Image (tube, coloured by chain):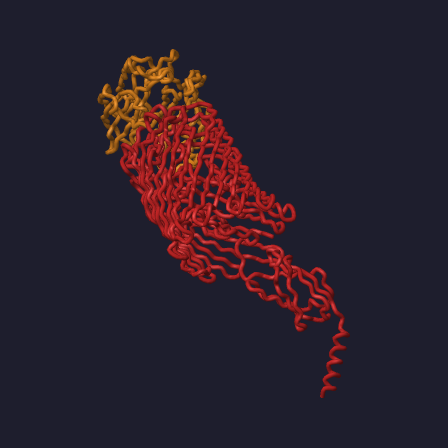
Amino acid sequence: MPARAFVFFWFFLSTLKAQEAIQLHGRLWEMGTKKPLAQANLFILPYKLKATTNQKGEFSFSDVPKSSCQIIINISGYKKFEEKDLCLADQDNLNIYLEKISYTTFETTVSAKVIKRDDQSMSLTQEEFLKMPGSFGGDPVRAAQNLPGVGQSGASAQIIVQGAGVDDTAYTIDGHRVPNVFHFGGLSSIVSPESVEHIDFLPSGYGPEYGKAMGGVIGLSTKPPMQDRWHGMAFMDLLNTGAMAEGPLDEDKSSLLISGRYSYIGQVLKAVAKESDDFALTAAPTFYDVTSIYKRQINENNKFKTTFVASRDELELVLNKSAGNDTALRGDFENVSSFMRLIPQLSTDLDTHTKMENSLGLGRDAILFNINGRYLDIDAKVISHRSELVREWGPTYKTYIGLDNYFTFSTVKVNLPNFYMVGGVNNPFSVGDQRKFVSKEQNSELAAYLRQEIKTSADSKWTYLPNFRLDHFTVNSDTTMAPRFQVRYQWDATLLLRASIGQYVQPPLPQETSQYYGNPGIKSPYAIHYTTGFTKDFRQGTTQGLELTNNYFYKDLKRLVISDVQTNYANKGTGKIFGGEIQAKYRMNDWSSQIVYTYLHSRRTIPGYGTTPSEFDQTHNLNLIAGYNRGRWTYATRLRYVTGNPYTPIIASTYDSDNDVYIPTRGPLYSKRFDDFKSLDIRIDRKFIYDTWILTGYLDVQNLTNSKNSQFIEHSYDYSQSNQVNGLPILPTLGAKGEF
Amino acid sequence: MKNLFFILILVFSSCANDDFKKVETLDAFRILAITSSNSEVAPGGSSVLQLFISDTKGGGRVISGTIEACIDPGIAFGAEVGCDHDPTRTTASYTIDTINDANLGVSNLYTGFAAATYTANIPATILLGRTAREQYNGVSYIVIFSFNVDGAVVKSFKRIVATTRSGLNANPTISNVSINGNVASAKPNKDDVLTLTTSVAEDYSYQNVDDSLEARSEVFEVAWYVSEGEINKPKALSSESVKYKSTPPTSPMLLIAVLRDGRGGIAVHRDVF
């Protein structure tokens, strides 16, 4: 028996030896994204050969019998790979692509986890806003409307924060103020979504590093460009087209991202408006934006990043008929608005406990509004500066000392009548006192702040934040010392309680302090914020389950600037905003859902008009959001219900015989409401995964039920007839995006 | 800056709602113009005011109203049109007899100048305490006409500007209205072109808020009205031609042009075909 076995074994070995051996060398990639898969095991059957990929995804087999072997790769999160006939010949450059079980929307960029400094702040990462329904193809700022406390913007096309006015909210990019975040009409934000890492929303009770806004702060943070290899993306939908490229400039130190978008919606409008008797588009409305980000790791302790953002919107038309029957509003109309910012940022680790951040915002804001020779032409050079020194003195004490300065050098050319508006109703342009002047101004907004995080002991559940901010505005020579106090109580690992009280001041608007147009004696309006709330995480350390956030807020508004017959503007207004909001996020397997609800009252008091609701007093604001992700399909839907905005009825009018216009007589301010806002939005994404790139087709439908959603009131020439003008009808956006 | 979007909304709302009544189509009682013998006067001067009204569907009636006259409360800055602020305001009554007034009556489709006039006497002290700019550009004295017609108040006003300026404004004039280049003598047909021949615009100077003196020329604006039909540009420059967009009625028809010089000067032309 042993002899027979020996003969058989000898025969088997000799058979093997007779087979020719081959070499297999190759790389293992993630399908679509071309990401190298490291530390993955590959098996060749039936020979039970095994290889493990290195950091570059490279693998190597030698002495593989030439045969119809089978290669098997089975990695968690990826579909199992099985393929035969790969062992028939030597292969020096075998590329194997593994398909993921599930792909996120924009796969080639990975959003970093947002580190929140303020407990009150809320953030949306790129992965979240790119697949948010109702966001016009993943626009970050529009997606922010799903956050608690964000109101329905109506015709203003701005972000409405907890019932505040549109001018009470500041917009920033990488911490530096920009004049706007939306292109015309709020269709899309001015930075391409793929270059934004996250958007932060600070509605109330925020820390001392944020200032010059008493209503809220919307901050866009750009992403660091990818370092691993060059990536690209291009998209096209019904509104615009754009592209992005990012990748390393050298081995491991610097990288670059460039993106741009161009909207051709104006060409569509021009075609539609061609036959109109009312106006003729002489140049189709267009907008475009460019974003560029450069990152360099100078050395171990110094990081450098520069963000460049430029945006421009243009519209030219001829008004054949007087707008609103106001003879001043006819003829040639031109509106151009643009801005650019170059934001160099240097981050330095001074030691293991001390960090320094310095950044500048260098740029230009320009606005031209011209209608038939009446114009507003603003050209402002802007320098903003932020510095912050963070020092961790020990486990119980941490400080942040910073500067937040903003300088403008502007030339303002004005030839406009005095513009009087109360209760959202303006008097005709023709009636106003004509103002024509050229003004060259230099204004500074200087601020310093101290933020402190204090614990009584290292394991204390209490954290105290006695913070201060000092602001000085040269435009009205106003200096404000604003204390801001926050306290946190970490009940356990899953429950955080918090409360804050603080003062928030902002400079008056430029026209309000103009010596020719406004009142140089205007003081800075401010608000006192009182907030409390909690966050409870029921997920027990997993990604599945419920997260609950509940906040309550009260804002006391002081020295609000209102139109005044005697002095153009006066600090005679006051206001109160109070309410509560809840956000419940639930995720289970392929499903995710959110309930976001805000209840608020926003009141303003104006002498002579009493206390009335404000323009954005939206009592109920409910968002129900659900998403389902399965394989290459993603479905998301949002149901939005918001109490109709108040408006001021016009109860009569007086004919101005000299100017041939009717001057409206206002009824009780904001005493009527538009119909409630209702919108059902859906978004469907379908991915097509190829070896080295991904094609995503998406359908984003806003207002699926075609609700009327009135946005403003139009009137007949003498205000005796009126009609609510509807907002966007059902609006499908079909798009495609390719990325590698 | 963010409020600029509101202006854009205003601009695009110019796409008129077709269900609303048309500004150029005469129907219910309206005041189309308040003319004055002098739109600018020296302090202490006076001006004679007269209403140009239309009541085409009124069927002939007497309409009574009131007059209030006072120093402008600051309408250009947002003040409500009224005289309650001025203890020296004057009041009077005013009656329009659309049947018997010489320029009205059924043959004129109850549209034309009301016979009654009102003389506004501007206080000699109106410029006291005013800035140099206000004295030069003028301070307005307003005359408000109010009528209660068919249950609604019809209110309108006119400014008489008191100024220290030497060259006072003169009313513009309309020589004739032309249809397709010929002096109008019959109803316009659909798509006929309407034009106006006017006096020459005057030059004047205006003191800006930075105290610079700006040389300006008047810009003549025309408001077109018809008793039936529509006009493509009911408010136009005097140099612009406009089109009558409707088939003319078989019944008598009114064609009216009201010319304004932007400084209170007004001229009215009326044709009845």
Residue A701's place in the image compared with A631, above or below, is above
- In this view, the residue in front, A431 or A235, is A235
The colour one sees for chain A in the rendered image is red
- In this view, the residue in front, A520 or B140, is A520
- In this view, the residue in front, A485 or B128, is A485
The colour one sees for chain B in the rendered image is orange
Which quarter of the figure has residue A507?
Answer: top left
Q: Which residue is at a point 55% across and 57% down the rendered structure image?
A: A687
- Give the number of marks: 0
Residue A98: percent from the left, percent from the top?
60, 62
Q: Is A599 left or right of A373, judged from the image as shown?
A: left
Work out which residue is located at the far top of the displayed protein and give it.
B166
Residue A513's place in the image compared with A584, above or below, is above
Which quarter of the figure has residue A298?
Answer: top right
Q: Which residue is at a point 52% across and 39% down the rendered structure image?
A: A358
Residue A311 in view here: no
- In this view, the residue in front, A183 or B95, is A183
Which quarter of the figure has residue B172?
Answer: top left
Residue B167: percent from the left, percent from the top?
39, 12
Q: Which part of the image, by quadrant, shows the N terminus of chain B?
A: top left
Residue A720: percent from the left, percent from the top?
31, 35
Residue A220 in view here: yes
Residue A146's place in the image compared with B208, above or below, is below
Q: Which part of the image, by quadrant, shows the C terminus of chain B?
A: top left
Q: Is B260 left or right of A348, judged from the image as shown?
A: left
Residue B11: percent from the left, percent from the top?
43, 34
